[in-house]
Amino acid sequence: AHRNYHPLPNQLGLGLDLPLSHYELLHEKQRGVVIHWERQAAEGNRWIKIKPNDPRIPEIFRYDQGREDIFITVNEFDGWRFIRLLRSLRSLYVDLDDYTDVYGVLDACTDAQIPTPNIIVASGKGLHLYWLLESLPPKALPVWQRCQDALIRIFRSLGADAAAKDCTRLLRVVGTRNKGEEVRAIVLDGHHWSLRQIAFEILGTEGKPKAQVRDIRVKRKTPDKAIQGSIYARWHLVFLDLLTISGHYGHHIPEGYRDKWLFLIGVALSWFTHPEGIEDEIVGLAHHHTDLAQPEIRQAMQPVLKRALQAAEGHT
């Protein structure tokens, strides 16, 4: 059964089967660090930080061809894959678990009146869908997150992984293998979306007939309300404000305020990551902005983790 696994119809688009081609499509005009991970490599050799114009790039991705369990970050960072170190947003994506019907994906896009993905990757277990973006700065994170969450809602019935929603995510590299299955892809459209265009297409259509949305876009000279203020924008501002407050104290939050600061910054982060990623983010922030020990940090963050898990389960 595995030998006959061919979920990508060749007539739909151009085949994509080289690791380097996948990397170059995602990270055109790279601005920050791309994290490369090989799960089965020896301890200490699993992670590579790929900087812009790194001379090792062709060699790294030639080595990846046909190897098991190779991943890269979809977005770019200043050093490591933390939200606070985000440098450039490069794609929206959806991870479909155990779903391989490409035509079903296209039908879902038609039904939801959104653009089809630029790239569809057969991951060996399901499909990864990419909407390529022009390089976006960290301040675009609130709108990016709204679009990301909307796409997961749209594809929920096809098995969209609700945990794969954060900007720090790693996804499999084309041309590598997943339990022996080759990771393959097709490129339906190689163009990169601007934030305004893709946000309008994804958010501006929610609950509205397409014709009505088109009319609104023609009449408005300012960006559509769909990509302006939101709960994501609010909590992104809270996150930035808390970092500014820390700066006022010389990045050393005084005793009596540390637990509250960590709680609030954890709540802010919970809008932009899945609970599985919050712990590492908060521990890193606490090391930079307080003198709390790790056990104290983890104790302070328990209310945040509890509520973030409830939110991920659909509680309001």
Image (cartoon, rainbow, N blue to C red):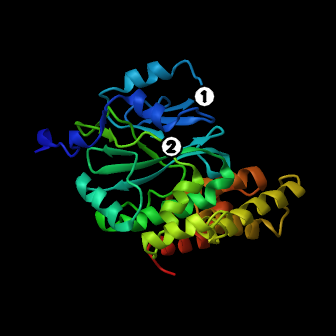
- At mark 2, the secondary structure is loop
Q: Amino acid at mark 1?
A: Pro
Residue 173, position as x, y percentages in the image: 38, 36
Crowd around label 1: few <14 · some 14–19 · many ≥20 (10 Å): some
Residue 135, numbered label: none
Residue 236, quarter of picture: bottom right
Q: Is residue 309 visible?
A: no
Left or right, 171 with respect to 144, comes to left
In front: 244, or 127?
A: 127
Q: CA distance from mark 1 to mark 2?
A: 19 Å
Residue 253, quarter of picture: bottom right
Whether the residues at callouts 1 and 2 have beta carbons within 8 Å, the answer is no
Residue 155, position as x, y percentages in the image: 36, 64
Q: Quadrant of the N terminus?
A: top left
Left or right, 90 with respect to 236, comes to left
Q: Is residue 130 visible?
A: yes
Sooner in the amino-acid sequence: mark 1 or mark 2: 1
The structure residue drawn at horizontal position 88% and vertical position 52%, both measured from the top left corner, is 250
The structure residue drawn at horizontal position 47% and vertical position 41%, both measured from the top left corner, is 191
Foreground mark, 1 or 2, reads 2
Residue 49, position as x, y percentages in the image: 56, 31
Q: How many marks?
A: 2
Say which residue label 2 marks: 192
The structure residue drawn at horizontal position 66% and vertical position 47%, both measured from the top left corner, is 137
User: For the view shown, which residue lies furthest in the bottom direction?
Assistant: 316
Residue 132, position as x, y percentages in the image: 48, 45
Say which residue label 1 marks: 52
In front: 154, or 240?
A: 154
In front: 9, or 86?
A: 9
Left or right, 216 with respect to 152, comes to right
Q: Amino acid at mark 2?
A: His
The structure residue drawn at horizontal position 33% and vertical position 26%, both measured from the top left corner, is 65
